Image (cartoon, rainbow, N blue to C red):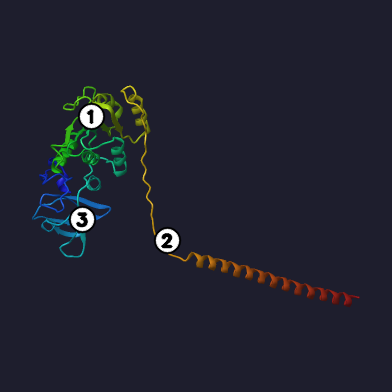
């Protein structure tokens, strides 16, 4: 959606009516809505009365969205097709956001939040904001009393992320997004007290460079997670953890396997077993009858050949 892009692109971001995590029952002007076409096609929309959404399913007036309950179906103006108006969640945001970088998806995000042991009121440091996919899940996990300090080394991406957090009602407040390279030796986490961080997460090309600088921030028993696609990155990160004071490192790969579950057709097991047994008996009887017929035919052929040979011998004599 165009409203998600940064102000640098020439498109403005609307001020939020509330946090995207508020649980109002109905859609108001200025609310963030996820437009659901199907499980592969979703988009985020800021409701602006007077405007019209046009997509492959038709035209939909923003005015018709106001006052409807989240989850409602909205018919297109021609009445031929429809979309669903869903309440925004980090999972739906991940499925509909504008990609500025490669992003993390639900399987990895769930494992990260679990392993970081996040809860309401937690303070988290994240480096590698990127498109903000994980950031929104972390913001939900820490709740309105928690704080997420997230850093992005690319200035344009940092600006876009800051605008999104503000538009989604997360900043200022629970999310503080800054531009900076946490891998530089002289880097300082300004405004983050030493020993006051519950968890840290790095999605960086060189996470091993960031580990020593982040270690003093973590409280005793705090958790650190790094995300790396290459085992060589993992190896180099593991090599610096012990020296930085971390213990019990663990390497995890998250895989998702989809199963198709369908109800088996209803059958009468006893009748089916009886039918199978009957078919087996009939087959055996047919096979036996065929064997008897073959034997009789072979016997008759043998007697005829013997008589012919006898007659020939007599004539020869």
- Residue at position x 34%, y 24% in the image: 242
Q: Is residue 109 above or below residue 246?
A: below
Q: Position of residue 165 (x, y in %)?
A: 16, 40
**Image side of residue 118 versus residue 6, left or right:** right
- Residue at position x 20%, y 55% in the image: 71
Q: Are marks 2 and 3 in contact (CB under 8 Å)?
A: no
What SS does tag 1 mark?
strand
N-terminal-most mark, 2 or 1? 1
For disc 3, the neighbor class at 10 Å (few under 14, some 14 to 19, many from 20) is some
Task: Give the number of the disc on residue 98.
Answer: none
In the picture of the structure, the residue carrying the numbered disc 3 is 71
What SS does tag 2 mark?
loop
Q: Nearer the viewer, residue 140 or 100?
A: 140
Q: Are marks 2 and 1 in contact (CB under 8 Å)?
A: no
The CA span between labels 2 and 1 is 52 Å
Q: Is residue 165 above or below residue 47?
A: above
Q: Position of residue 73 (x, y in %)?
A: 20, 59
N-terminal-most mark, 2 or 3? 3
In the picture of the structure, the residue carrying the numbered disc 2 is 264
Q: Position of residue 115 (x, y in %)?
A: 31, 36
**Image side of residue 287 versus residue 44, left or right:** right
Residue furthest right in the image: 317
Q: Nearer the viewer, residue 6 or 250?
A: 250
**Image side of residue 301 versus residue 213, left or right:** right
N-terminal-most mark, 1 or 3? 3
């Amino acid at each position: 959606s165009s409203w998600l892009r940064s102000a640098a692109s020439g498109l403005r971001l609307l001020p939020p009516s509330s946090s995207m995590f508020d649980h109002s029952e109905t859609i108001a002007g200025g609310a963030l809505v996820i437009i659901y076409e199907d499980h592969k096609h979703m988009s985020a929309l800021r409701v602006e009365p007077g405007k019209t959404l046009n997509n492959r399913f038709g035209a939909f007036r923003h005015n018709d969205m106001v006052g409807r309950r989240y989850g409602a179906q909205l018919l297109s103006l021609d009445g031929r097709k429809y979309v669903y108006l869903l309440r925004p969640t980090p999972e739906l945001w991940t499925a509909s956001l504008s990609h500025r970088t490669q992003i993390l998806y639900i399987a990895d995000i769930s494992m990260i939040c679990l392993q970081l042991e996040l809860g309401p009121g937690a303070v988290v440091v994240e480096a590698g904001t990127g498109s903000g996919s994980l950031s929104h899940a972390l913001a939900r996990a820490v709740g309105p009393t928690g704080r997420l300090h997230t850093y992005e080394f690319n200035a344009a991406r940092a600006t876009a992320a800051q605008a999104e957090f503000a538009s989604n009602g997360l900043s200022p407040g629970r999310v503080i997004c800054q531009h900076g390279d946490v891998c530089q030796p002289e880097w300082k986490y300004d405004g983050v007290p030493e020993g006051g961080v519950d968890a840290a997460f790095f999605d960086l090309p060189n996470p091993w460079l960031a580990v020593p600088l982040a270690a003093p921030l973590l409280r005793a028993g705090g958790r650190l997670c790094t995300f790396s696609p290459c085992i060589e990155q993992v190896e180099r990160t593991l090599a610096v953890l012990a020296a930085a004071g971390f213990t019990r490192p663990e390497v995890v790969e998250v895989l998702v396997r989809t199963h198709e579950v369908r109800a088996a057709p209803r059958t009468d097991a006893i009748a089916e077993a009886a039918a199978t047994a009957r078919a087996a008996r009939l087959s055996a009887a047919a096979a036996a009858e065929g064997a008897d017929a073959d034997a009789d035919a072979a016997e008759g052929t043998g007697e005829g050949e013997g008589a012919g040979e006898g007659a020939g011998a007599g004539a020869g004599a």
